[in-house]
Amino acid sequence: MNDKHQEVKEYYGQTLQKSEDLKTNACCTIEAPPKHIRNILKDVHDEVKDKYYGCGLTLPYDLKGMKILDLGSGSGRDCFIASKLVGQEGFVVGVDMTDEQLEVANKHIDYHTEKFGYAYANVKFLKGNIDHLDLLDLEPESFDIIISNCVINLAVDKQKVLADAHRLLKPGGEMYFSDVYSDRRIPMTLQKDPVLWGECLSGALYWNDFLTFSKKAGFTDPRSIENHPITIENAEVQDKVGDIKFFSVTYRLWKLEGLDSDCEDYGQSVRYKGTIEGKSSSFDLDDHHNFPCGKMMTVCGNTFKMLKETRFAKHFEFFGNWDTHYGIFEGCGGNMPFSEGGEDGACC
Ligand SMILES: C[S@@+](CC[C@H](N)C(=O)[O-])C[C@H]1O[C@@H](n2cnc3c(N)ncnc32)[C@H](O)[C@@H]1O
C-alpha cells in the first residue's frame, strides 16, 4: 500500500461522510438514471445511497444471470442495483479497500436480499486493492461484466488495472464503467495534491492515454457511451486546475478476439429484434450506434462482433460473413474528443 492508497482510504473513510461533503462535483452523476434503475433505487437503503460517490451510470442492459465484478464498490450502491438486475441466478462481487465503505456495504446485504425477495444473497464484498487485483482470489475469465464508477482515476497503476480486468473477463465479456478524464496530462504538482486526487480530478487520465492503455490491455476498440463536461464549482479548486478540462465518460470495452484497430467494412448487416428488456423500440450499443427494432443496419466488422459474439447475439439477426473486405467502414465515429456543450445537473 503506497501513500496514495493511504490518502484515498482516509479521504473515503474519514474525510467524507456523505455525498454532500464532496468539495467539487467530479464524483457526482450528472445524467438521471433510466426508469428501471430509478425504480430499483427506491429499494436501496438510504445509508448506502448517502455514501454514493459515482460519476456515471455503470449498469448496461440485459444483465439477467450475469456474474459481475465492481471495482471500487464503495458503500455498494451499484452492486445492490446489479444484484436486483442479475436476479437470483446471477452474482455480484464488489471490491473496495476502505474499511468504512465496506462496513456500510456488508451491513446491508441481508436488507437487500430480503427486499428483492431472494432466498439467499447474490452479492458479496471483498476487501482488496484494485491496483493488485491479481492478489485477490478471483478466477481468470470468470466474470461476464466488470463495472466501476469513478474509481480507476484513483488507482496508481491504471494500465495494470485494465490488464487485470481483461484477464478476469470471460471471452465476449465487457468492462462497462464511468470515470473522470482530462483533455491533457495532469502536471505532477497537481497529482501530489491529496484533495484534488481524492476528489477524482488530479488522477484523471488524459483521454488519449486512456485509449492507448485500453488497447495495450487487449481492449482493441473502446466505445464511449456517454460523456459530460465536469463543472468543478469550487473557485479554489478551479484556480488550481486552471485551463484543464475534465469529463465524466462511460465506456464499454469488449474482450473479443480479432477486433480490427479501425472499423473495416465486410458488407455485414444486423437487425435488432427488440427483445432486450426495457429497450423494445431501439437499442444503443454506444453513442454512435443506435439500432431501431426491425431496421436493417449496415455495420463494421467490429460492431458485428460486439453483437454476434456477446450476450447480445440472441437479440439480433446477422447477415453476411468475412469473405469480402470492402475497405474502411465510413461512419463509425472517429477520435474521441468529448463535446464541451454544457449540461448542468444536480449532484448525485
Ligand atoms: C469515488 S468513490 C466511488 C465509490 C462507488 N463506486 C460509488 O459509486 O459510490 C471511490 C471508491 O473507490 C475506492 N478505491 C479507491 N482506490 C481504490 C483502490 N486502489 N482499490 C480499491 N478501492 C479503491 C475508495 O475506497 C472508494 O470507496
Image (tube, rainbow, N blue to C red):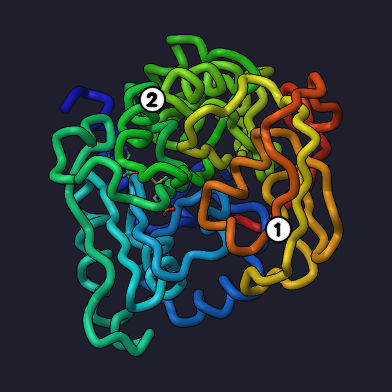
The image quadrant where one finds the N terminus is: top left
**Badge 2: how crowded within 10 Å, few (<14), some, or many (20+)?**
many
- Tally of numbered tags: 2
Pointer 1 residue: 317
Q: Tell me, yes or no, if residue 240 can be seen here.
A: no
Residue 122, compared with residue 149, is above or below; it is below
In front of the other: label 2 or label 1?
1
Task: Return the residue nearer the eye: 332 or 13.
Answer: 332
Classify the position of ligand 1 by quadrant: top left, top right, bottom left or bottom right.
top left
x, y (%) of residue 179?
Answer: 52, 39
Q: Residue at x 43, y 46 (%)?
A: 148
x, y (%) of residue 121?
Answer: 24, 76
Q: Calculate the distance from the C-alpha at mark 2 to the C-alpha at mark 1.
A: 37 Å
Marked residue nearer the N-terminal end (2 or 1): 2
> Which residue occupies the extreme front position in the image?
323
Q: Amino acid at mark 2?
A: Lys
Q: Residue at x 38, y 70 (%)?
A: 83
x, y (%) of residue 235?
Answer: 63, 32
Q: Residue at x 19, y 53 (%)?
A: 126
Pointer 2 residue: 158
Q: Tell me, yes or no, if residue 48 can be seen here.
A: yes
In which quadrant of the rendered view does residue 129 lie? top left
Task: Return the residue nearer the eye: 180 or 211.
Answer: 211
In which quadrant of the rendered view does residue 301 lie? top right
- Dot 2 falls on a residue whose secondary structure is helix
Residue 248, compared with residue 119, is above or below; it is above
- Dot 1 falls on a residue whose secondary structure is strand
x, y (%) of residue 142?
Answer: 28, 49
The image quadrant where one finds the C terminus is: bottom right
Q: Residue at x 22, y 58 (%)?
A: 125
Q: In the image, is 346 to the left or to the right of 105?
A: right
Q: Which mark is residue 17?
A: none
